[in-house]
Image (cartoon, rainbow, N blue to C red):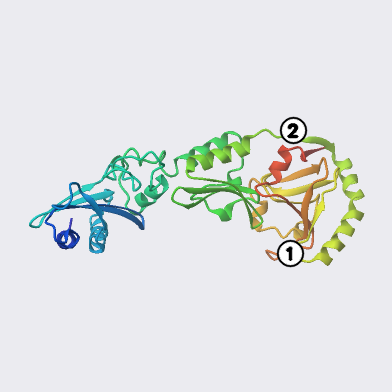
């Protein structure tokens, strides 16, 4: 530790001692003080402390207020004592005895419980611990340690990125397009439309969402990368009904028969303006989307490319035409595609209604069926 840092720690320790000595005399009043104890802990920006005074007027130590100056000194000490790859201490215990002897010990390994009901924060309470695991893991990111220096109770269940790498390898075994899933560290701009994305919001906070044409739908939130990746795997591998085999000529006939309805719907949507309307999806009519199955939007079958306003990456490697057919009426949001990516738009598109649902969910439920054209 550099000399200047050692000097700062020495000065702060003296400041801590002076604050405890002053507090002991003030709190004791007319009695003679025998001992002043402080225990203090910090996790992130939050902290907690407790203090006890032993004097000649009381048979046992009594709780008193932690001096503000002591809190300031301890917070500064914790920051100055933080070391690369070793982190910093989790709690400190300081004792002052007459005439002015200070003893300070620092706890680097045991878990402090701010809601402990005993005289020490190191005694576990019956209630859920305060701070939570999430708070301590956030503090660990602020003061990182080598993995072998992290206490067992605080050790993450995996190294960041391990589960994402395992998921990526597993998806390759089932032939899922690599660009159909975005994991932490991936370039989201290279993804296909309808991708499933694992988003790391912060320490111990992950989201799993569908991303489609600039829109997002949250499927789940988790504390760990492992749980988020497990959700993705379960979502993509859950059984779906086999595609319907329908002659291409019949699909064309069904699409042609729906043209008058589309003309009427287009007029209603133009009148409704941005946001469109909620309507029932016609059953027995073919629809499609470009990309992967896991999206939010789909279109009348064979809507011209320029009317879809798709980004250039939408037709990249791994993208395919997903043909769908509604097996029963279902509420969807219908709207006119706005201009985007130098495309005029103007086509009709449908958006899956309901929180936490995408096209795959409707397919899994049998509301939509994938279609395999046959000659």
| Distance between mark 2 and mark 1 Cα atoms | 34 Å
Residue 260 x, y percent position in the rendering: 92, 55
Residue at the disc numbered 1: 338
Instruction: Name the residue at 76% across, 63% down.
Output: 345
Nearer to me, 75 or 288:
75
Q: How many marks?
A: 2
Residue 24 x, y percent position in the rendering: 17, 59
Residue 212 x, y percent position in the rendering: 65, 53
Specify the quadrant of the image occupied by residue 31: bottom left
Residue 131 x, y percent position in the rendering: 38, 48
Instruction: Name the residue at 74% across, 62% down.
Output: 275
Label 1 crowd bin: few (<14), some (14–19), many (20+), radius 10 Å: some
Instruction: Name the residue at 66% across, 45% down.
Output: 294
Nearer to me, 342 or 370:
370
Residue at the disc numbered 2: 242
| Res. 138 visible in picture | yes
Horizontally, residue 19 falls left or right of residue 308, namely left
């Amino acid at each position: 530790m550099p000399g200047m840092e050692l000097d700062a720690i020495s000065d702060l320790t003296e400041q801590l001692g002076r604050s405890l000595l002053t507090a002991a005399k003030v709190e004791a009043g007319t009695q003679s003080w025998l001992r002043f104890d402080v225990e203090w802990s910090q996790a992130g920006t939050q902290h907690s402390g407790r203090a006890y005074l032993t004097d000649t007027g009381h048979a046992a130590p009594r709780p008193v207020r932690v001096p503000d100056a002591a809190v300031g000194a301890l917070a500064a000490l914790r920051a100055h004592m933080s070391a690369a790859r070793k982190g910093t201490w989790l709690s400190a215990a300081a004792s002052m005895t007459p005439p002015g002897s200070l003893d300070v010990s620092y706890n680097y390994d045991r878990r402090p419980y701010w809601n402990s009901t005993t005289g020490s924060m190191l005694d576990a309470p019956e209630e859920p611990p305060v701070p939570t695991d999430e708070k301590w893991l956030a503090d660990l990111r602020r003061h990182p340690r080598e993995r072998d220096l992290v206490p067992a109770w605080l050790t993450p269940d995996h190294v960041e990125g391990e589960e994402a790498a395992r998921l990526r390898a597993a998806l390759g075994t089932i032939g899922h397009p690599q660009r159909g899933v975005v994991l932490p560290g991936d370039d989201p701009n290279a993804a296909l439309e309808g991708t499933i994305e694992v988003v790391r919001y912060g320490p111990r906070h992950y989201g799993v969402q569908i991303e489609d044409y600039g829109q997002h739908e949250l499927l789940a939130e988790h504390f760990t990368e492992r749980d988020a990746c497990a959700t993705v795997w379960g979502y993509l591998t859950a059984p779906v009904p086999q595609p319907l085999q329908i002659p291409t000529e019949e699909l064309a006939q069904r699409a042609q028969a729906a043209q008058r309805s589309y003309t009427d719907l287009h007029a209603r949507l133009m009148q409704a303006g941005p946001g469109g309307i909620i309507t029932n999806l016609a059953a027995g009519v073919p629809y499609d989307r470009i990309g992967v199955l896991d999206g939010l939007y789909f279109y009348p079958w064979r809507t011209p490319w320029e009317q879809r306003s798709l980004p250039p990456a939408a037709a990249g490697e791994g993208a395919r035409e997903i043909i769908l057919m509604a097996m029963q009426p279902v509420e969807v949001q219908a709207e006119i595609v706005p201009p985007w990516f130098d495309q005029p738009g103007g086509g009709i598109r449908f958006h899956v209604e309901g929180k936490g649902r995408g096209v795959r969910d409707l397919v899994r439920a049998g509301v939509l069926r994938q279609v395999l054209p046959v000659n």
